[in-house]
Amino acid sequence: MSEKNSAANCVVCGGVTRTLRDPQLKRPTPVHYDVCDRCGFIRKQAAFHLEAADEKASYDLHHNGFDSPGYVAMFERFIAEAINPFITEGKGLDFGSGPGPVLHHLLQKQGFKMRHYDPYYHPNKDALDAHYDLITTTEVLEHLSDPVGTIDTVLARLNPGGILAIQTLFHPRDDTAFLDWWYRRDDTHIGFFTPKTFEKIVEKHAAKIIYTNDKNIVVIQKEKRERHETIHP
């Protein structure tokens, strides 16, 4: 089911990928993925990505808001695990907030000065011109054709010492388990990560991973500026 793919290099680390065929998912032919064994990134091949209109239509079917207790509880767990232990105040951006910015409002209630951005529902690009102490991206990166570029963008908007808190479900490393994994079945999911993938992404930045639960959360901190003080006798 898998073979070396000499035509594609990993968009994360540049390594040679191999092609993995998914006989269960046909759109209309079996879905193919580019798998990088070096950094763990798996990318659905471009031929199987949805057009923007179809992607938006899929998102419109979601009805997630404060009237969904399970959805709210997911963000409360995320805040407790990925944010509160590392930062408790400051300016924040919820990147990829969706039609109902629940996380944005929960963090506002905690005292963060929040803004939110979503390319479909809140495309206020001026939010991407500011700098923040906290940026969140929850269940977003798996939808993006250029997740590395997105992480580059948001890290550039972090203040020194700022926190980027990410949630996306990490894939099983075994091919057989991956091909039985429910998360890949969403047509809008095109990129799948492991903690090692994020280690590779962060390597080129003045940043470091300060926490991962090895399941679905990784927290990245931008390095603080060095202080150059003049000491007078």
Image: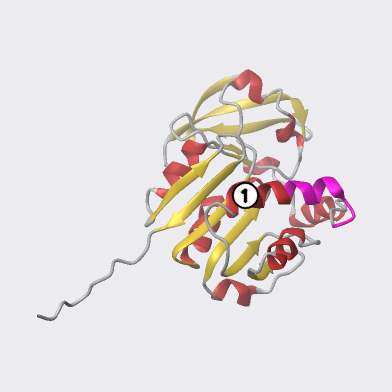
Give the answer, above or below, for where 208 lies relative to 23. below
Q: Is residue 47 above or below residue 67?
A: above
Q: Which residues are magenta?
A: 66-74
Q: Residue at x 72, y 51 (%)?
A: 75
Q: Quadrant of residue 91?
A: bottom right
The residue lying toward the viewer, choosing from 17 and 98, is 98
Please name the predominant secondary structure of the magenta segment in the image. helix
The residue lying furthest to the front in this view is 233
Q: Is residue 193 left or right of residue 107?
A: left
Mark 1 residue type: Leu
Position of 73 relative to 39 (above/below): below
Residue 181 visible? The answer is: yes
Q: Is residue 215 above or below residue 157?
A: above
The residue singled out by tag 1 in the image is 141
Q: Position of residue 85 (x, y in %)?
A: 55, 51
For this view, does 140 lie left or right of residue 233?
right
Percent coordinates x, y for residue 229 in the rendering? 22, 74
Residue sitting at 62 percent across and 49 percent down?
A: 141
Q: Is residue 67 magenta?
A: yes
